[in-house]
Amino acid sequence: MSTPTLLPFPESLRAGVLVLGGGPAGAITALRLRQLGVGDVLILDARDFPRDKTCGSGLSPALIGVLRELGVWSRVAEVAYPIEGMRLTTPGGHEVDLPARGLEVGVCLRRDLDHVLLQAAIDAGARFVPGFRGKDLVEEDGRVVGVRTRDGREARGRFTVIATGAHAPLAIEPERKRTIHTMMGWWTGLAFRPHWMEMIYDAGLLPYYGWLFPETPERVNIGITYVNDGEKRNARETFDRFLDRHYADRLQGAEEVWPRRGHPIVWSYQVPKLATPGRFVVGEAGRMVHPATGEGLSYAARSGILAAEALAGVLLSGHSERLARATYRARCAKAFTGPFLAGGAFMRAIRSPWTDRLVAAASDDRPALQRLTHGLFSKL
């Protein structure tokens, strides 16, 4: 995998579209802009690539479908680990195997995924400048015209796309946001079923869960997702209790290869305001994350495409910017509100004692099992 070509860091940078953030949301926005014919796209990021990113790293069928649309799935597949099924454990301890029949699922370390997507955008003609940590928006006459760093350096463009994830001080604050917490670690030498992931709805984490995702034939990622619900939990202690309950035996003799890491995930049931004059927000910066699973990659990818199409309409076809802003939010709301509300219903249902009964019934009912499989894998 080649390393992105770096530009010298000038005092002032200009482009038709600035994309602040080189992760999947930003890289896909830039890639799609270039595919649509937008000529001058500049990606800015605080860090150089490849770089580490804390994430469960699951690739859902929805995300893989978007990557196929963009023509980059073959590049990602080269560094991804394919998944053939999931072992699901319910709050009551009922276990069921869910084969991924007919569904493409994978796991890809974010260091690799993000690097591939950024390189694809660069190969398509986008420019990339690392070492740019945007602190303030540059505004003129009520319109965003660029971004400024803490030391006063500026990048300017006709449009600025904010793609900086959960910590997005330059995004548009929604009416209400919620936060999910995660903690994870990586091990080698731990026995696991090749090409199968594990998802455990532990009673101590409800309505969220813990997981084991194999990333390579030798290494696994084990983690938890939880919410504080008014009480201040210690992430490491919560993770240790989960490991003791579910993986104590298998961790004997395994080697923990990287330091444990955690990160917040922010989300909202409703798609918030996503654009103001000169500014569009994509991905988790716009709280577009599935509430029941914390999966945000597919929403980052789809919102990046929708933002690029709205911007291309203005830049190439003379569409009204005001209409483009409204259309972008409306298309995101149409695509995401249903899954977000369904996720809320799932979180309520998973606490019910009926969950175990339904899973037990599905185990003996092939059509029901297939529906359960498709539903869970599609929301990874």
Image (tube, rainbow, N blue to C red):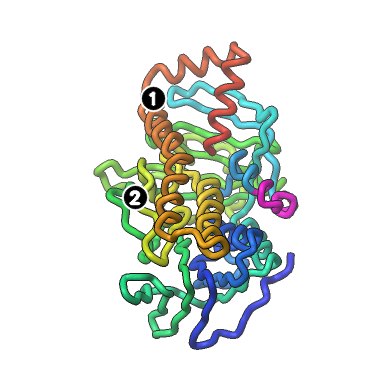
Query: Which amino acid type is marked by label 1?
Result: Ala
Relative horizontal placement of residue 55, taking residue 4 as reference (left or right): left
Q: Residue furthest left?
A: 230
* Quadrant where the image shows the C terminus: top right
Query: Which amino acid type is marked by label 2?
Result: Asn
Residue appearing at x 53%, y 39% in the figure: 211
* Quadrant where the image shows the N terminus: bottom right
Q: Which mark is residue 85?
A: none
Q: Secondary structure at mark 2?
A: loop
Up/down of 165 relative to 152, above or below:
above
Residue appearing at x 69%, y 34% in the figure: 84
**Residue topped by disc 2:** 234
Relative horizontal placement of residue 287, taking residue 306 as reference (left or right): left
Up/down of 294 relative to 283, above or below:
above
Crowd rating for badge 2 (residues with CA inside 10 Å; few <14, some 14–19, many 20+):
few
**Residue topped by disc 1:** 349
Percent x, y of residue 165 = 45, 58
Nearer to the camera, 228 or 144: 144
- The reply to whether discs 1 and 2 touch (Cβ–Cβ < 8 Å) is no
Crowd rating for badge 1 (residues with CA inside 10 Å; few <14, some 14–19, many 20+):
few
Residue 10, picture quadrant: bottom right
Q: Which residues are magenta?
A: 67-79
What distance separates the C-alpha of mark 1 from that of mark 2? Answer: 26 Å
Indicate yes or no whether the magenta region holds residue 78: yes
Residue appearing at x 67%, y 65% in the figure: 119
